[in-house]
Image (tube, coloured by chain):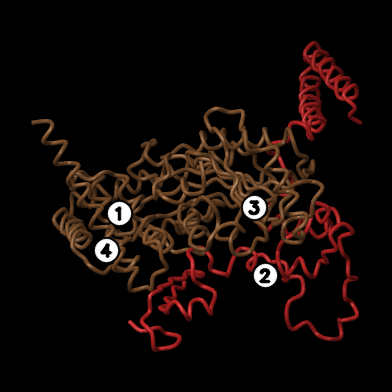
Amino acid sequence: MSLQHFISEAVSPWMKNDGPDSDIVMSSRVRFARNLKNYVFPILSNREHNLEVIEEVRNQFTDVPDDQVGQLELIEMDDLKPIEKRVLVEKHLISPNLIEQSKNGAVLLSENETVSIMINEEDHFRIQCLVAGFELKKALSLANSLDNWIEEKVDYAFDERKGYLTSCPTNVGTGMRASVMLHLPALVLTQQLNHIIPAINQLGLVVRGSYGEGSEALGNIFQISNQITLGKTEDDIVEDLQGVVRQVIEKERAARRALLDNSRIELEDRIYRALGVLQNSRIIQSKEAAKCLSDVRLGIDLGLVKGLSKSILNELLILTQPGFLQQYAGASLTPTERDIKRATLIRERLELEDQLTKNVEGDEQ
Amino acid sequence: MTCQECGERPATLHFTKIINGEKTETHICEKCAKEKGEVEPGTNHFSIHNLLSGLLNLENPIGESPAQSYYKPEISHCPKCGLTYQQFTKVGRFGCSECYKTFSDKLDPILKKVHGGNTVHSGKIPKRAGAAIEIERKVQNLRSKMKEYIEHEEFEKAAETRDLIRTLEDKSSSEGGE
């Protein structure tokens, strides 16, 4: 296993499995922020201490006892090229923060990319577990077992009253952020989401774009997560989030049905136009690509578009991000070159899909 | 579309910011974006920390009259990492675990604001470091249960609970707890 393994494929192995409610929920994630008792937090620490932390990780934490995770690969940010780092961000394996603001950052990745443990980010450890579909409990139990395993070997900064001590007081307590990535095209199209977001915010939950804090919702993909980390148990936080997400899923399904019932022809027009753009364009910007991919994915979920696999939205959305495009091209590209490359990639990918379907049909006859 | 900043190059990055329901759109080219520090997704520099430091500075609203300046709080700093409260209000982050003790008197109002009124942790406790705390929590739960039993005159159950508390307390002291 090496770095190449993580940056050559747009789709993480875990994405290939369909989780529960995968027509709407793309992934569930749980992350724990943890710090070491005897070191100052990364924002104030020096190079020497940072490297000590990384060394400790290298010596103790590459073999996970749990066989559902397998070996972990340690990757240091200082060893990576800018494009390679960017690819890891685009795949959600590391945060933009780790490459921009951290000194001597590193990450431990599992082969199936379900587990990512960032080191020397805002906190010493950021344990993250990503699973397909609506499965927060599964992500939580995996994060818990990794957390216990790490705690066997190091002393965490923990206070009886304040819980796990984190650099930012917005994470103190459980240090947990649980989030769900949702594809909500019908709620956006019917403009219901604008009314739903304030209601969600009042419940202590946050709605953001797909790349977290401050990012735009590319391709109608939204992330809902807990804001409050103190005074509630991990299970309660996850259950509250689950309850709200469950309702959002129902609302999205209802909006999709209503669209089909009331304006089927307009919806079909929109979806097939989007497919046409993706199949034929020669220059396409990432925003337009994301919009069209979202429309086509909606078409697939509603059974209007046949012969395309669901994972195509996830895959192409990541594959057509600037970092990935350049990694793929093996060179840095100007914005126009990227738009051309993006269009080519999408066309090729769709043609491949088409051939696959034809082969399957041929076999069946 | 040309870039809003330089008006020369084509705009290749499009940002939509929604702050307090007010939507602003920005269309800029890569060069200007880089200068403004807005290149990659999710790296919008107006982050939670900015918001947080906004909350922290509420204590000293701008425009406070100079006559009150002799009221200046003494500059407290963390003995372990050297962070001052002033610095904390700027970056919105603590420097080490000791900071939570150093600035404890100022902490609870902040925590209340960001955690829906909560100030005390009730979630997971680390197994090794928290074995004693775990027992302490159990004991407290049992004590309140025992009280309830006594109030309802269920003395047999109360006695059972008392024995359970004793066993737990013995266990914690034999394991080197307090």
Separation of disc 4 and disc 1 at Cα? Answer: 25 Å
Q: CA distance from mark 2 to mark 1?
A: 36 Å
| Residue nearest the observer in this picture, B92 or A201 | B92
Residue A186 badge: 1
The chain ID associated with circle 4 is A
- Which mark is on residue A171? none
Mark 3 to mark 2 CA distance (whole Å): 17 Å
Helix, strand or loop status at disc 3: loop
Q: Between marks 3 and 4, how big is the CA–CA gap?
A: 46 Å
Circle 4 residue: A343
Mark nearest the camera among 4 and 1 is 4
Q: Dot 2 corresponds to which residue?
A: B54
For disc 3, the neighbor class at 10 Å (few under 14, some 14 to 19, many from 20) is some
What secondary structure is found at the residue carrying circle 1? helix
Looking at marks 3 and 2 on the same chain, the residue that comes earlier in the sequence is marked by: 2
Question: Are tags 2 and 4 found on a single chain?
Answer: no
> Which callout, 4 or 1, points at the residue further toward the start of the chain?
1
- Is residue A363 rendered to the left or right of residue B36? left
Marks 3, 1: nearer the viewer: 1
Q: Residue at x 29, y 56 (%)?
A: A293
Q: In the image, is residue B48 above or below residue B139?
A: below
Residue under pointer 3:
B116
Chain containing mark 1: A
- Chain B is which colour? red
